[in-house]
Image (cartoon, helix red, strand yellow):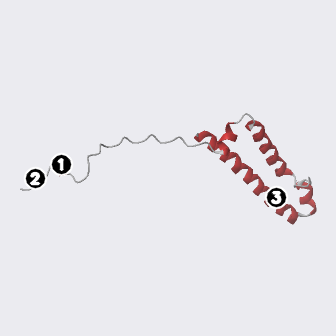
Amino acid sequence: MSGAKNSIISDPLPYLPPEAPKKPERPKPTDWAKLGRSRKYPLINQQFETRKEYFRHFTPDGEAFSKMYAENPEAAARWAAIASEVIKELDDMQYRIELEARKQ
């Protein structure tokens, strides 16, 4: 018999007590989250809403869609599609800012 098989002495590695799990680090706020919690965000949000309302009725150069539609429906349809994309991007930015601000 060469020695005990079930003792600390027979372990090939030194005994290490289990480590307690580390507390997860709090994630750093993103720029979107900082913007969403800033005091200026209501003003920025109002500007987003104003721009969306503008693009619902006018082209970027200020011509009304209703007037353009009466003169050239195809051009008005192209501008309406572009305006829809711009409005969608503004909506996406607002959603992202509010989502990030709520996370943190």
Could you say which is closer to the camera, residue 13 or residue 71?
13
Real-space Cα separation, disc 1 to disc 2, in angstroms: 9 Å
**Front: mark 2 or 3:** 2
Asked whether disc 1 touches disc 2, contact meaning CB atoms under 8 Å apart, the reply is: yes
Q: Earlier in the sequence, mark 2 or mark 3?
A: 2
Could you say which is closer to the camera, residue 5 or residue 65?
5
Callout 2: helix, strand or loop? loop
Could you say which is closer to the camera, residue 99 or residue 72?
99
Real-space Cα separation, disc 3 to disc 1, in angstroms: 81 Å
Three-letter amino acid code at the position of disc 3: Ala
Three-letter amino acid code at the position of disc 1: Ile
Q: Dot 2, how many residues are within 10 Å of its Cα: few (below 14), some (14-19), or many (20+)?
A: few
Image coords of residue 36 (percent x, y): 68, 40
**Residue designated by label 2:** 3
- Say which residue appears at 79% left-offset and 60% top-offset: 81
Residue 77, quarter of picture: bottom right
Q: Which mark is residue 80?
A: 3
**Residue designated by label 1:** 9
Image coords of residue 56 (percent x, y): 82, 51
